[in-house]
Image: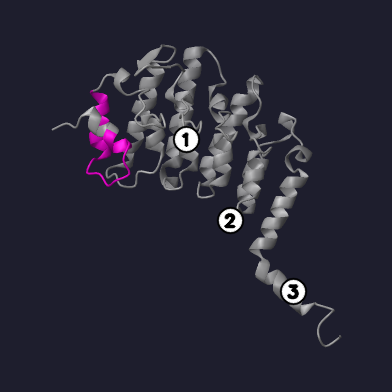
Amino acid sequence: MMISLQDVFEFYSSFEPSNLTWKEILECLQHSNAGDFAYATIDSDERTLLHCHFASHDNVTGEDNDEIAVARMLIERSIDMGGSTVQLGGMEEHGDSVLTTVSGHDGRTPLHYLFENSSIPHSLIRYVELIIEMSARVDEKRKTSSYWNELMLQQNDRGMTPLHLMAANTSIEYIAVSSVLNKCNDAWESRSLIHPLLQRDTDGNLPIHIACNQADANEQWIEAFVGFLDSDYKVTYDTVFTYRCLLDTLMRFIIDHEMEFGQFWNDNNWWSSEER
């Protein structure tokens, strides 16, 4: 017996263990009208199904392929409806896809949830590949080449873009980070928008500043965000490595090596009790 769309809504709005599988959810969406779910919101935070899908759902069983296919279905249906006005309980939603829809709670798009989520690093590269494909589809439909960077420039209530959240999530594999940033560079060739790596949050931080402030950020992680800002994009290291960024990096190094610094101080303290 096929589950209902209501079952899907209840699943995404609950954090309780579920008996549903990704295959059942996918089959339900495939047999439903796009207007029933593409832009529908399911809770007081006005989150769409895609917002919830990119949040943690470790309680779901099934194949990774079905999980990705559910996300594809949600995005494709929204693109098919792009440019139209959808009436949902008194609300009107506009957009080229659900990827730019913000939640009413904190202004986050589905991609903010995706890059913040540390429980899906194994499948993140596949989600990145899917979103690259879907953004190209929107560009083809609009006859543009900037939709990817429009997605990466979306800011939440704190001014943070998906790249800021990705920079804070060191569980993300390097291959996923490099794919995202490579696409930012490719999409920036039109020069119609600011480069996403140069978008600051409300505290004035660039994504690289967030990356430098992570306790477990290694050299490769930081280089991932710096290496893409080369001379072709007229970005200098003076722009990126501000005083604040260098201070954060130094303080993080000191905190991470507190015991070593303490031992060094004890071994080299000229004002030892014996000399007094």
Magenta residues, as a range? 10-31
Instruction: Please state the horizontal and vertical placement of residue 43, each as a whole percent of the image.
Output: 36, 32
Return the residue nearer the eye: 212 or 123. Answer: 212
Q: Residue at x 72, y 46 (%)?
A: 245
Tell me which corner region of the image, top left, top right, bottom left or bottom right, holds residue 236: top right
Position of residue 237 relative to residue 98, above or below, is below
Q: Is residue 260 left or right of residue 180?
A: right
Instruction: Please state the horizontal and vertical placement of residue 64, each as a whole percent of the image.
Output: 33, 41
Residue 42 forms part of the magenta stretch: no
Numbered badge on residue 128: 1
Element type where label 1 sits in the image:
helix
Write down the residue under mark 3.
264
Q: Residue at x 46, y 44 (%)?
A: 117
Q: Residues within 10 Å of mark 1 (few under 14, many from 20)?
A: some
Tell me which corner region of the image, top left, top right, bottom left or bottom right, holds residue 63: top left
Tell me the distance, in whole angstroms, between the alpha carbons under discs 1 and 3: 45 Å
Numbered badge on residue 216: 2
Quarter that holds the N terminus: top left
Which of the two discs, 1 and 3, labels the residue nearer the N terminus? 1
Which of the two discs, 2 and 3, labels the residue nearer the N terminus? 2
Q: Amino acid at mark 2?
A: Asp
Instruction: Please state the horizontal and vertical placement of residue 186, each as a whole percent of the image.
Output: 60, 27
Look at discs 1 and 3 and give the one toward the viewer: 3
Which of the two discs, 1 and 2, labels the residue nearer the N terminus? 1
